[in-house]
Image (cartoon, rainbow, N blue to C red):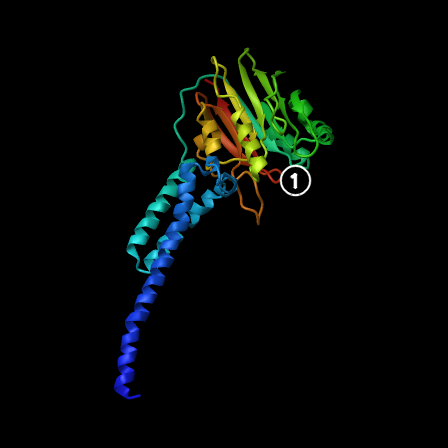
Amino acid sequence: MSESTATEEAASERPVTSVQSGRIRTVAAWTGVTAWGTWALLRWAGGDRVPGIDVIAAPVLALTPYAVAASPIPVLLAAGLRRWRAATAAGAVALALAAAVAPRAIGGGEPAAKGPVVRVLTANVYFGEADPARLADLVRRDRVDVLSIQELPPHAVERYESAGLSALLPHKVIDPRDGAAGSGLYSRHPLRALPELPDTQLAMPRAELTLPGGRTVEITAVHPVPPLAGRALRDWRHDLAVLPSASDGGTVRILAGDFNATFDHANFRRLVGRGYADAADRAGAGLKPTWGQAPRPLLTIDHVLVDERCAVRKVEVHDLPGSDHNAVLAEIRLP
């Protein structure tokens, strides 16, 4: 082969190689956009309520804050590959995801509530393994009025009560059960048990709290099953749906517990939309994790929901040795 022929063949191959390389860069850039864009679509479309994809979407959507943290990746990838349309699209997707998550760290306005203050603590005690002394110390130190406790088995009741709960919170409406199924309410002030919610898989006791001066509040200890499979997803959706709306005839209601749900679940947002406000969201603490230990992801699934007419004075998240959950304290002023 002559030198001129080889040169011509090499020259003819260069445009082909360049076109192929360009296509690969384009595909890579838009793949990132598609991946994060699908996540944003699932989040804003309420994927945990869409038949056919809800089983997958429900657990995945709980990780949305991590998707937000990683959303610059497709932007930087597309920009590095000089695919500017893809970079612009990736930026729009990142903004859409951030718009869903960022408000939880900002907080919101409070109504002009002038009623008495109620301090609510919720704690998932992990099959009764959480440290009783630590739980009693939190109740004592923060002058808790009501404790919502989940995963309370019968054998653990005496451990917690003898550690100080009975002295600090002498009134109770509890439903201890084996495994993770038991829950209860302990209170500084009188409690009157209310009818059980229909057909919940785990115990979710309810009570009317009477404060000094005669003011009453309804409290529910919340613990639906985690939405990790088809049947469990249906039960989780049912248990959230049967929780009472925030106000009925002027009654003020508070829901406190392990919801196994975050604000990235449409089912949870629907519940909040029934007249509630999430105390941590109001206080700008809505992204503080309440569950998980490395290497598992940290999630915000424990909540105190209050009648939206209430004012949230503060929210704190406390470690709870022996449990895979943190305890959440909310100080609430009633309307």
- Residue at the far top in the pictured view: 214
- x and y, in percent, of residue 157 in the image: 71, 28
Residue at 51% from the left image edge and 43% from the top image edge: 56
Category of crowding for the residue at label 1, using alpha-carbon neighbours closer than 10 angstroms: few (below 14), some (14–19), many (at least 20): some
Looking at the image, residue 102 lies above or below residue 88? above
Q: Quadrant of the C terminus?
A: top left
Q: In the image, what residue type sits under mark 1?
A: Gly
Asked whether the viewer can see residue 259, the reply is no
The mark tally for this picture is: 1
- x and y, in percent, of residue 137 in the image: 63, 31
Asked whether the viewer can see residue 223, the reply is yes
Q: Nearer the viewer, residue 32 or 76?
A: 32
- Residue at the far bottom in the pictured view: 2
Q: Nearer the viewer, residue 40 or 164?
A: 40
- Position of residue 3 in the picture relative to residue 72 (left or right): left
- x and y, in percent, of residue 267 in the image: 48, 32
Q: Nearer the viewer, residue 107 or 250?
A: 250
- Position of residue 221 in the picture relative to residue 162 (left or right): left
- Position of residue 79 in the picture relative to residue 129 (left or right): left
Residue that numbered label 1 is attached to: 322
Residue at 59% from the left image edge and 26% from the top image edge: 221
- x and y, in percent, of residue 10 in the image: 30, 78
Looking at the image, residue 105 lies above or below residue 17? above
Looking at the image, residue 65 lies above or below residue 24? above
Residue at 32% from the left image edge and 53% from the top image edge: 87
**Quarter-of-image position of residue 198:** top right
Assign a secondary structure to mark 1: loop
Q: Quadrant of the N terminus?
A: bottom left
